[in-house]
Image (cartoon, rainbow, N blue to C red):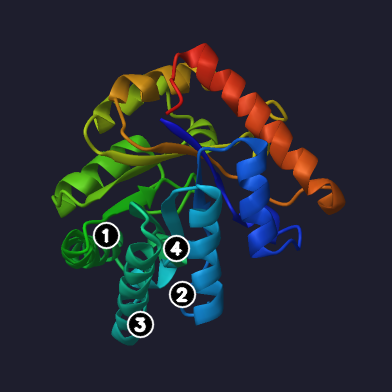
Amino acid sequence: MKLGLINSAWAQAGRGTAFGIQQTKAIGFDSIDIFADPLDTDARERKLIRTECERVGLPIISVACVAVGLIDLNPSVQRFHAGRCRAYLDFCYELGARNLLLVLGEYIWERQVIPAAEQWATAVTHLKALGDYAAQLGLEIALELEPFRQSLLNDVPNMVKFIDEVNHPAVRANIDVSHLHLAAARPEELRALAGKVAHVHISDCNGQVHGDLPPGRGVVDFVPYLREIAALGIDGAISVELEYSPEPGKIVEWVTEAYRETDKLLRTAGIARE
């Protein structure tokens, strides 16, 4: 598998797109994921992302999209977000990416007023349609497991159930190791996702709240999860996801530490770098 980085690590520290791409390559990553909204990204920035990644030799694996409005109770909001997701898929195609990393929303009003089954069914319907659009472009959608109590996809059984109900070859799962830890998912649960995974995220956390820290700065026991991931035989990338550095001026050191420690973990787990 490739070892990648989500470029939001650089943007959060106030560094420009070209700088982030260049540093990602210089540090040693094999690939990059892009966190950018096509509705907020002008033609010059889109071209910069594509041409700079090509120039330094960093393939773009994934583009990340948060689309909580897909399961809003208002049809007009749903339509907007469905169209926005299609724009993201077009953006993935333009960049030569493999998949759209998609974050679905949460049950509103603590599953009161609006039946939980109704929100679930709405999400399934939209993902069937988006799966068709992705397939037309030769892309996949990788659904993010979010460890929050009201998230639709907040554990492995729910992820498996959702993918099975959508029943579309272009709609698959993203595995996020720190999210699995926060959801109290056992490593062996990942076996239920065999043949259903398109992408992987890796980061650390304090065991209590979402953190996206460099591996080794938190409490996650990575190797058992990574060994299960290796057994799944995923043809793709493991991408490091980092939140805000406590010292933005030392972002290069922060990302370099994450690269170094993740590379060690992959070697220990027997995951070969491509």
* Amino acid carrying mark 3 in the image: Phe
Distance CA(mark 1)–CA(mark 2): 26 Å
Q: Three-letter amino acid code at disc 1?
A: Trp
Q: Considering only order in the chain, which callout, 4 or 2, is on the residue closer to the N terminus?
A: 2
Q: Residue furthest front?
A: 55
Name the residue beneath numbered marker 1.
120
The residue drawn where x is 34% and y is 77% is 73
Q: Secondary structure at mark 2?
A: loop
Q: Residues within 10 Å of mark 4 (few under 14, many from 20)?
A: many
- Near-viewer residue (26 or 91): 26
Q: Is residue 161 left or right of residue 69?
A: left
Q: Secondary structure at mark 4?
A: strand
The residues bearing labels 1 and 3 have C-alpha atoms spaced at a distance of: 18 Å
Q: Which of the two discs, 3 and 4, sits closer to the camera?
A: 4
Of circles 1 and 4, the one toward us is: 4
Read off the residue under disc 3: 80
What whole-number distance in Å separates the C-alpha atoms at marks 2 and 3? 14 Å
Q: CA distance from mark 1 to mark 4?
A: 19 Å
Q: Quadrant of the C terminus?
A: top left
- Mark closer to the chain start, 2 or 3: 2
Q: Amino acid at mark 2?
A: Pro
- Residue 10 position, x and y percent, is 69, 55
Locate residue 128, reporting x and y percent.
Answer: 17, 62
